[in-house]
Image (spheres, rainbow, N blue to C red):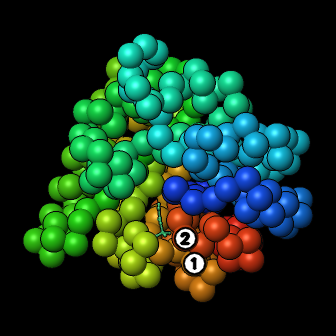
Amino acid sequence: MNNKKKLIAGNWKMNGGLAANEALLKALIAGTAEVACDVAVAVPAPYLAQVQALTAGTTIAVAAQDVSAHESGAYTGEVSVAMLKDFGVRYALVGHSERRQYHGETDAIVAEKAQRALAAGVTPVVCVGETLQEREAGMTEAVVKRQLAAVIHLNGHCISEIVVAYEPVWAIGTGRTASPEQAQAVHAVLRTQLAAASEHADRIRLLYGGSMNAANAAQLLAQPDIDGGLVGGASLKAPDFLQIIAAAR
Ligand code: PEP
């Protein structure tokens, strides 16, 4: 029985602008005065201050799309976890497939980022997922287990403080969603792996991400090991995102 409070997190990616953000957030705030789940929006770093101010005192938490693996110093373009904390950031995505693909982030770097976030009290949302080629080669389980293993073996931190997002790469931004059964099967694998590493594994929220939308959210979220969603495209449209939030009970 899945009785964890679900988490629906929007990932705006590199979208938005001051006016568009304000309009979107006003609609989201109006629609989330009473919600059954936790809600977050992962916004581009330049807008953290704006989003923090607009969401203050609401049910919407601020998330970052990435965090540096380093504490501070000569890392041009990077944003440290201390900086995120200055803007009230509660969650940080780490290891999103777009970071792995376009920025060469390895499992080791993702683990360092997760550790950096955890140490500062920011919850890392660790993204794992296989490419289409890997799925077709029957490697899905091996790939997600390898990606998760890198994070589970963090030193000194209770892994029940993380959130894991299963995001099959072939489903991200493609309109091609994993079926509820396909997603549940991978989530069950991840849950078993977590259970072997921590007695608190049942507390860890496992999100599904990959073309989740207003039409398919309820079925995905009804699966026993799916504890929420990481939503890209559909999080940019208030009515769609609100419908997904409403489906998370
Ligand atoms: C994502 O970016 O994490 C994502 C799941 O995107 P989309 O919902 O657009 O597939």
Q: Quadrant of residue 112?
A: top left
Q: Quadrant of residue 64?
A: top right
State the image coordinates of residue 62 (x, y, percent, origin top left). 68, 43
Amino acid type, mark 1: Asn
| Tag shown at residue 233 | 2
Please say if 142 is above or below 105: below
Residue at (63% x, 81% y) in the render: 214
Q: Which quadrant holds the N terminus?
A: bottom right
x, y (%) of residue 138?
Answer: 13, 70
Q: Secondary structure at mark 2?
A: helix
Above or below for 189 versus 74: below
Question: Please, what secondary structure does the residue beneath circle 1 have?
Answer: loop
Determine whether, in the image, residue 239 is placed left or right of residue 34.
left
The tally of labels here is 2
Residue flagged by tag 2: what amino acid is it? Answer: Gly
Residue at 63%, 67% in the rendered image? 235
Relative depth, front residue between 141 and 114: 114
Q: Residue furthest left?
A: 137
In the rendered image, which residue does mark 1 sit on?
A: 213
Residue 128 in view, yes or no = no
Residue at 73%, 62% in the rendered image: 20
Q: Quadrant of the C terminus?
A: bottom right
Ligand 1 within 8 A of label 1's CB?
yes
> Is 24 rendered above or below residue 126?
below
- Could you classify mark 2 by the number of other residues whose Cα lies within 10 Å: few (under 14), some (14-19), or many (20 or more)? many
* Label 1 or label 2, whichever comes before in sequence order: 1
- Relative to the observer, which residue lies in front, 116 or 157? 116
Left or right: 193 in relation to 6: left
Residue 79 at x, y = what percent?
A: 50, 29
User: Does the beta carbon at disc 2 come under 8 Å from ligand 1?
Assistant: yes
- Residue contact between numbered discs 1 and 2, judged by CB atoms under 8 Å: yes
